Image: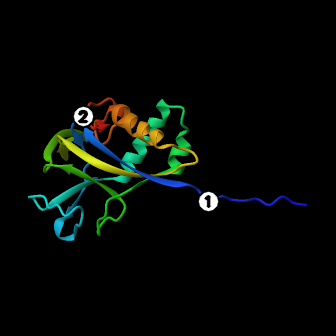
């Protein structure tokens, strides 16, 4: 007699984790998005300049996968069994995490491309915070694992250009 294979439903949990900057965030050209407030319904708040800013969920997820290198947690398990849920936006549903910040300043840096030097402008958020909504497989992770990954990703990896992972001093954050 053949044994029947039983596939159990996964226990999916969701946790919210608040993070705030410990160094400025410099985003890649075009990687941040602004949401016009006429289309936005997030907590009913409207910023004076009429925009709300966000960073791709994938940026936080990649940082958390990289943070697994500093733990006993398997990077592949993080990639497959954890997902960040974006904030509601009609233009970019489920893709962006809202950055709570003042209007970014322009950050200019000189880059070389094919022997030519030019100035590249990037948005720089000096002080920022965000609320991450993380869905995870509770048969493989506990909430403390997720918080630890976010904490390590903020201190060891970072986000954006000139982040810690690449030898820079920007894009660091902490859980609060």
Q: Is residue 114 visible?
A: no
For the point 61% across and 59% down, the residue is 9
The image shows residue 57 at horizontal and vertical percentages of 37, 53
Q: Considering only order in the chain, which callout, 1 or 2, is on the residue closer to the N terminus?
A: 1
Q: Which residue is mark 1?
A: 9
Observer able to see residue 56: yes
Q: Secondary structure at mark 1?
A: loop
Badge 2, how many Cα within 10 Å: few under 14, some, many 20+? some
Which sits in the foreground, 49 or 31? Answer: 49
| Tally of numbered tags | 2
Which sits in the foreground, 143 or 156?
143
The residue shown at (18%, 39%) is 109
Q: Quadrant of residue 89?
A: bottom left
Query: Residue 49 placed where, x, y %?
Result: 9, 59
In the image, residue 68 sits, relative to residue 12, either above or below, namely: above
Q: Nearer the viewer, residue 150 or 35?
A: 150
User: What residue lies at 23% left-to-right and 42% top-to-bottom?
Assistant: 26
Give the residue number, with chain letter if any, for mark 2: 22
Residue in the image at 65% along x and 58% along y: 8
């Amino acid at each position: 007699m053949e044994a029947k294979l039983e596939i159990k439903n996964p226990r999916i949990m969701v946790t919210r984790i608040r993070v705030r900057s410990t160094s400025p965030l410099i985003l890649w050209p075009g990687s941040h998005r602004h949401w016009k407030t006429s289309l936005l319904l997030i907590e009913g708040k409207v910023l004076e300049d009429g925009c709300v800013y966000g960073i791709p969920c994938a940026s936080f997820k990649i940082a958390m996968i990289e943070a697994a290198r500093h733990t006993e947690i398997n990077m592949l398990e993080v990639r497959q069994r954890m997902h960040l849920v974006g904030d509601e936006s009609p233009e970019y549903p489920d893709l962006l995490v809202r950055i709570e910040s003042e209007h970014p300043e322009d950050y200019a840096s000189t880059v070389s491309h094919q022997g030519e030097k030019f100035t590249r402008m990037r948005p720089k958020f000096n002080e920022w915070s965000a609320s991450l909504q993380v869905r995870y497989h509770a048969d493989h992770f506990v909430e403390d694992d997720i918080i630890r990954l976010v904490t390590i990703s903020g201190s060891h990896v970072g986000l954006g250009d000139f982040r810690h992972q690449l030898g820079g001093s920007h894009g660091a954050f902490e859980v609060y």
